[in-house]
Amino acid sequence: MAGMATHVITGAGSGIGAAVARRLHARGDELVLHARDAGRAKELAAEFPGSRTLVGDLAEPDRLSWAFSHQTPPDRVDSLLHIAGVVDLGEVGELTPRSWRHQLDVNLVAPAELTRLLLPQLRASRGHVLFVNSGAGLAAHAGWAAYAASKHGLKALADALRQEEHAGGVRVTSVYPGRTAGPMQAKVHQQEGKEYDAGKWIDPESVATTILMALDLPRDAEVNDLTVRPGR
């Protein structure tokens, strides 16, 4: 993306989202950072000087449209990067509807709604929608039913969106990272009752490199699905 591109990013507070935001900020792109609440927005704005924020709780997708109507959403969007996510492990015999709904809302329904709300801008710029999915979006394992279901759903969202918007020039990419070092991975290990060693997993910077590659690819090509696995 030549020139000053504007990126809307969810999950810029930590992990892969923070790595991507740092890289785009460093090269002078415009950032619009999604935040759960005003306090978080203030922290992100301080961390990324010159960036704007967009406040709305992904756990309440029904209220995003209302929340944005009280703010000034960006009039230009070159890329929408869905990087925020939550994980709550549990076997089907134990998972409650509340746990199912929380993961589905944050990981699937909110990205769908955020995409819907920003599609006019994305169509106008022939922009890019990028979903950070997960290995769990391709295969589900014991204890991962709800999270994997939300990520399998996210793959379906991306695949349908790609077909719907392709003719208009909007590119859609899904990235499926394996286990990546960061707060979410620490939480997963805690839930699994295992010791967490960040050095064993993918560095968020490596995933950020693949995301920027997909964004910066010349217009004659589109990365559809990209799987990133630990190299050690």
Image: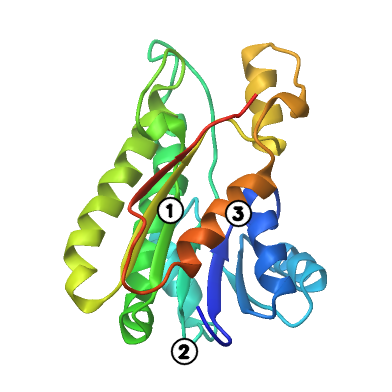
The reply to whether dot 2 and dot 1 touch (C-beta < 8 Å) is no
Q: Is residue 57 visible?
A: no
User: Of the residues under marks 2 and 1, which one precedes in the sequence?
Assistant: 2
User: Given the image, on which type of amino acid does mark 2 rest?
Assistant: Asp
User: Of the residues under marks 2 and 3, which one precedes in the sequence?
Assistant: 2
Q: Would you call the spot at circle 3 few (<14 residues within 10 Å), some (14-19), or many (20 or more)?
A: some
Left or right: 39 with respect to 215? right
Q: Would you call the spot at circle 1 few (<14 residues within 10 Å), some (14-19), or many (20 or more)?
A: many
User: Of the residues under marks 3 and 1, which one precedes in the sequence?
Assistant: 1
Q: Of tags 2 and 3, which is closer to the observer?
A: 3
The image quarter in which residue 3 lies: bottom right
Give the SS element for disc 1. Answer: strand
Q: Residue at x 56, y 65 (%)?
A: 9
Q: Tell me the number on the disc at residue 209.
A: 3
Q: CA distance from mark 2 to mark 1?
A: 21 Å
User: Given the image, on which type of amino acid does mark 1 rest?
Assistant: Phe
Q: Nearer the viewer, residue 136 or 106?
A: 136
The reply to whether dot 3 and dot 1 touch (C-beta < 8 Å) is no
> Residue 89: where, in percent of width, then height?
52, 22
User: Given the image, on which type of amino acid does mark 3 rest?
Assistant: Thr
Q: Residue at x 76, y 14 (%)?
A: 195
Q: Tell me the number on the disc at residue 75.
A: 2
The residue labelled by disc 1 is 131
Tally of numbered tags: 3
Q: Of tags 3 and 1, which is closer to the observer?
A: 3
